[in-house]
Amino acid sequence: MNPSTIEQTCDRLKREAEAAGYHLNSDEAFVRDLVEGLLTNEERYGYWACPCRLASGVKEEDLDIICPCDYRDPDLNDFGACYCALYVSGEVLDGTREPESIPDRRPPGGPGTLAPDPKPTAGPSGRGLAYPVWRCRVCGYLCAREEPPGVCPICKAKKERFEKFME
């Protein structure tokens, strides 16, 4: 793999992550190794399958582990880093939190066998929702997940600026 391609990709990934309110691991050599794995998987499969997981080579079966994977945000909230530790929370980055051991959230068998959703609750429409919908009080960004994001990807407001919009 061309070292300049790896460096350019690392730089681009860091810029994009920071612009969206995320942080890459501060260990630059570690990040370069992960980026090399992502680029290798892109050559091999045509997409950025997480280098820390076994990809099937069938994009539709691997959609949940294409970087950034579906499990990144819950891992950051719960453990301070994503499964492969490419992304870390702000607290881990500034040293106020130690990253924890991260279990793989991906269920055996891949995305077609996702872990059971939390018990649905009745929303305003009378339909049950698998996840609450969070609204950024600053810009109105909406997302459906167990917890609001650490930082709004639109306006960069912190997690505490989100309110539960719908259950």
Image (spheres, grey):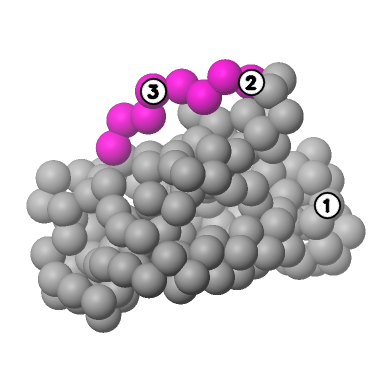
Please state which amino acid type lies under the numbered disc 1.
Answer: Ala
Q: Position of residue 18 (x, y in %)?
A: 70, 57
Quarter holding residue 17? bottom right
Please state which amino acid type lies under the numbered disc 2.
Answer: Arg
Residue carrying label 3: 101
Residue carrying label 2: 97
Quick one: 100 or 34, which is closer to the camera? 34
- 2 or 1: tag closer to the N-terminus: 2
The Cα atoms of the two marked residues, 2 and 3, are separated by 13 Å
Please state which amino acid type lies under the numbered disc 3.
Answer: Ser
Q: Which residues are magenta?
A: 97-104
Q: Position of residue 122 (x, y in %)?
A: 51, 51
Q: Pointer 1: residues within 10 angstroms few (<14), some, or many (20+)?
A: some
**Does the CB distance between marks 2 and 1 fall below 8 Å?**
no
Q: Nearer the viewer, mark 2 or mark 1?
A: 2
In the displayed structure, would residue 156 be above or below residue 115? below
* Mark 2: secondary structure: loop
Q: Which mark is residue 157?
A: 1
